[in-house]
Amino acid sequence: MVEAGVGVVFILAVTLGFALGVSAPATESAQLDAYAEDAATVLANEPPRHADETRLSEVTRSPAAFDRERDALEARVDRILDDNLMFRLETPHGAVGYERPATVPTGHTVVPTPGGEVTIWIWYV
Amino acid sequence: MRGQANLPALAVALLVLTTTAGLGVAVADGAFASADRDAIDRAGAAALADRLVAADSPVTERRNVLNASRLEADEADETQAGLESLVPEGAAVRVAVDGEVVYERGDPTGSPTVRRLVLLAEAQAVTIEPPLAFGETTLPRRSAAATITVAEDADVETVRANDRVILHDPDGLSGAHDVALSRYETTTLRFDGDPQEGDVTVTYYPERTRKAHLEVTVDAGP
């Protein structure tokens, strides 16, 4: 009878693992990565506001160019993204957007430009 | 005697053990069924969305920029045929732009939807008759192409866009010419020769873009 009890406890332990459930699929960050890539593609192919090749190479060219463009860049990224998304765009000369939270899933993408890499982080509000 | 006393205990033990094992298998089965992650549907939707926003897709102008006029009703047949060549066979597919269905085959409701951020571009033609007092004119907005029409007897030998020669004829240009410009910079057209006011008209195609969502839902079937 003791042996049967041990067996039952063993099987129940295995069952408990299934009953607790399998974690939800991590599809959120894949979707966020897609959003980040889309935003980066749109920005990377956009004409510059003043000079240089594209909008992103314009802001990475010099700290002065970044300071001049930062407000327009932030407004532009904000417009491209949905209202339920938040972003941070990092360039070698500084960043625009919000502080990146540590606890929520984020998507990101890196775009190389002549002046350095631009990283875009996206997460849900 | 001892063995016989244990027999009912053994039977009960076996019964309890098999019942528990059966229960465990049932719970495990339920867990696996609920863990159906629609992986194939999601992968299909993601791949189709990728192909739709690619630079060479039938609905895009360039990467992530959809051509708005190709989604409108009068060009629907061509667009439908183009989309038909992209979607996998035997799958139920719905493609929507900003909630409006542009392509549907079957009913994929309930399958995962992949969303992409795109721009909808609309180009309209604007024709100007540039003032030629200084032999040059700057197009008010950036445009990837332009049509330059020169009157029959106008005296224009060369047309330059930002100092790059785009049209040249030593005997004098005439007629309509399509030229490629850069959409990344403002274009200044220079007309070499002695054209009179009204001899030259320029049609350019500035682009308006607005943001939109592309939503792709795929049900790959059972």
Image (tube, rainbow, N blue to C red):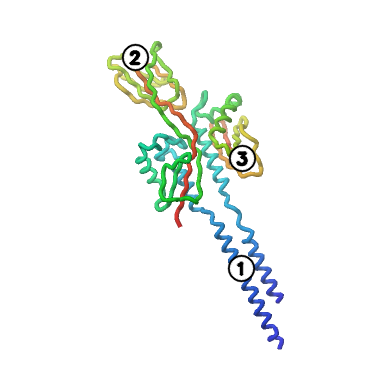
Percent from the top left, x then y, of residue B175? 29, 21
**Mark 3 touching mark 1, by CB under 8 A?**
no
> Residue A125 has which mark?
3
Q: CA distance from mark 3 to mark 1?
A: 42 Å
Of tags 2 and 3, the one toward the viewer is 3
Of tags 1 and 2, the one toward the viewer is 1
In the picture, residue B60 is in which quadrant?
Answer: top left
Is disc 2 in the same subunit as disc 3?
A: no
Is disc 3 in the same subunit as disc 1?
A: no
B209 sits to left or right of A59: left
**Mark 1 touching mark 2, by CB under 8 A?**
no
- Give the residue pinned by disc 2: B198
Percent from the top left, x then y, of residue A34? 53, 42
Seen at 65% across and 68% down, the residue is: A11
Query: Please, which chain is the residue tagged with disc 3 on?
Result: A
- Give the residue pinned by disc 1: B23
Percent from the top left, x then y, of residue B180? 38, 27
N-terminal of the two: label 1 or label 2?
A: 1
**Label 2's element?**
loop
Q: Residue type at mark 2: give it.
A: Gly
